[in-house]
């Protein structure tokens, strides 16, 4: 389809084909619900700790186990998406994580909750690679950055939705019904995806392939593709360490009493702060796409990471709640907005036949390497305090920026 020029900031979206818009919405809905589940867990973490008698280290280990499971699920679903199609991978991944999100509400022991978190992680991990690959292959290059950024921005919407659900349900009914609500929007997404079609690029690749994608998997670890894989995996590991280490514990940091080193906010105020932060996050995701399509994918990515490294110490050592409210949107803007860049960069570095596998491996191996972050932050907080523990994530942001500086992209990128 030929895109006509338009002056509106969203003209690229309104002029898109119905297939492009439908694909974009489907991927965004799935990613939104993925993030909603993460927020549900982090905001009920304090209640879960008290009822199930979990230490901070074990509570963090629950999230670490989910991330490890998501990593293995993501790698497997990446291969599945290349072999059987992006839309099938999307549908199956959403079904798995939605069912086991609801199952978390039925648990009464740490062991059963851990099992549910591990099983939902398998589906959670498959969402990103299959959805991002489908959008990247459906949208033209001149708008790909904006489209993938808009998909990524739904993560912020999911966080806000999760915070609103917790604020409405937790004070009245406790933490278990919070997880029951989590399955309802996922059912809507599954219904919506029935009308999706595979991308023309994947269909053509399958029709013309002289050998199955599975037999070419080894190419990802040799030559220029191997170099790209090493860089993408390591820089994503550093960003995910920073992200999960910071945002798993931010709600707890805000709600902890001042005597414990927190800010003593109620669950309603914590949810309100989270919504404000996610407004900044949404803008960070979307703005990244415009900057990346207009200027440089690489240097926009590095700039976001550098600013995130600066914002973290400012945030954790400011005692004034009013200043925290002002800093929240900035932490969200820079501390998560760079994720739009990872989807754009990786989708353009790898060929169609291996794109799902490459994106799934790079993103989810990074998850494996970063999965210890919630546990490490929780463990260090027991002796050093949560404020000091959270500053570790600033160093991880800087490390990711240094690794990203070695990327070799096209002149535009």
Image (cartoon, rainbow, N blue to C red):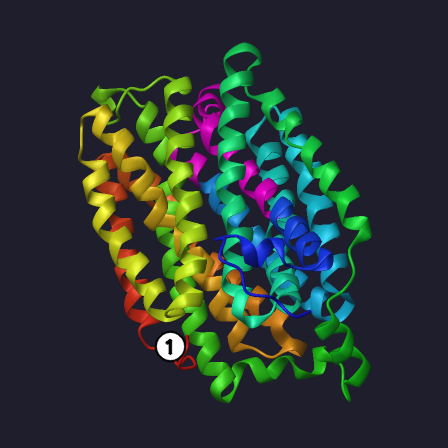
**Residue 369 visible in the shown view:** no
Residue pictured at 69% horizontal, 38% vertical: 186
Quarter of the image where the N terminus is located: bottom right
Give the quadrant of the C terminus: bottom left
100 lies left or right of 237 = right
Q: Image point 38% across, 24% down: which residue?
A: 270
Q: Which residue is mark 1?
A: 407
Evaluate whether residue 90 shows in this view. yes
Residue 289: x and y in percent read 45, 59
Residue 289 to residue 229: above or below? above
Front position in the image: 157 or 82? 157
Of all residues, the one furthest to the top in this rendering is 172
Question: Which residue is rendered at x = 36% and y = 17% of the image?
Answer: 266
Q: Is residue 51 above or below residue 412?
A: above
In x, y percent, where is residue 399? 28, 63
Q: Which of 383/308 is in front?
A: 308
Residue 36 colored magenta?
Answer: yes
Q: What main secondary structure does the magenta stretch of the protein show?
A: helix
As drawn, 140 above or below 185:
below
Which x, y percent locates residue 137?
64, 69
> Which residues are drawn in magenta?
31-60
């Amino acid at each position: 389809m030929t895109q006509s020029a338009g002056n509106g900031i969203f003209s690229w979206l309104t002029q898109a084909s119905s297939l492009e818009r439908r694909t974009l919405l489907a991927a965004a809905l799935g990613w939104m619900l993925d993030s909603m589940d993460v927020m549900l867990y982090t905001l009920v973490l304090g209640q879960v700790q008290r009822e199930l008698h979990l230490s901070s280290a074990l509570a963090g280990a629950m999230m670490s186990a989910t991330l490890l499971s998501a990593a293995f699920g993501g790698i497997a679903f990446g291969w599945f998406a290349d072999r059987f199609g992006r839309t099938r991978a999307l549908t199956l991944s959403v079904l798995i994580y939605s069912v086991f999100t609801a199952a978390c509400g039925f648990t009464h022991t740490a062991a059963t909750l851990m099992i549910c978190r591990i099983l939902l992680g398998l589906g959670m991990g498959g969402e990103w690679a299959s959805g991002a690959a489908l959008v990247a292959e459906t949208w033209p290059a001149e708008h790909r950055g904006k489209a993938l950024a808009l998909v990524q921005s739904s993560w912020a919407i999911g966080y806000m939705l999760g915070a609103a659900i917790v604020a409405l349900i937790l004070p009245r009914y406790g933490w278990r019904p919070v997880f029951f609500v989590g399955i309802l929007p996922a059912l809507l997404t599954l219904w919506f995806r029935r009308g999706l079609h595979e991308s023309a690029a994947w269909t053509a690749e399958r029709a013309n392939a002289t050998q199955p994608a599975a037999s070419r998997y080894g190419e990802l670890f040799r030559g220029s593709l191997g170099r790209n894989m090493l860089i993408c995996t390591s820089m994503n590991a550093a960003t995910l360490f920073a992200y999960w280490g910071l945002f798993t514990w931010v709600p707890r940091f805000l709600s902890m009493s001042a005597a414990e080193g927190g800010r003593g906010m109620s669950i309603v105020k914590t949810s309100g702060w989270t919504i404000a932060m996610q407004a900044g996050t949404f803008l960070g995701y979307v703005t990244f796409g415009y900057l990346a399509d207009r200027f440089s994918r690489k240097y926009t990515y590095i700039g976001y990471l550098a600013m995130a490294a600066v914002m973290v110490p400012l945030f954790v050592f400011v005692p004034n709640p009013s200043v925290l409210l002002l800093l929240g949107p900035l932490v969200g803007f820079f501390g998560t907005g760079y994720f739009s860049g990872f989807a754009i960069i990786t989708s353009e570095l790898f060929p169609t036949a291996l794109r799902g596998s490459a994106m799934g491996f790079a993103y989810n191996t990074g998850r494996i390497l970063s999965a210890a972050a919630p546990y490490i932050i929780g463990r260090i907080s027991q002796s050093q305090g949560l404020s000091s523990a959270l500053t570790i994530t600033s160093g991880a942001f800087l490390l990711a920026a240094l690794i990203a500086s070695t990327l070799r992209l096209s002149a535009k990128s």
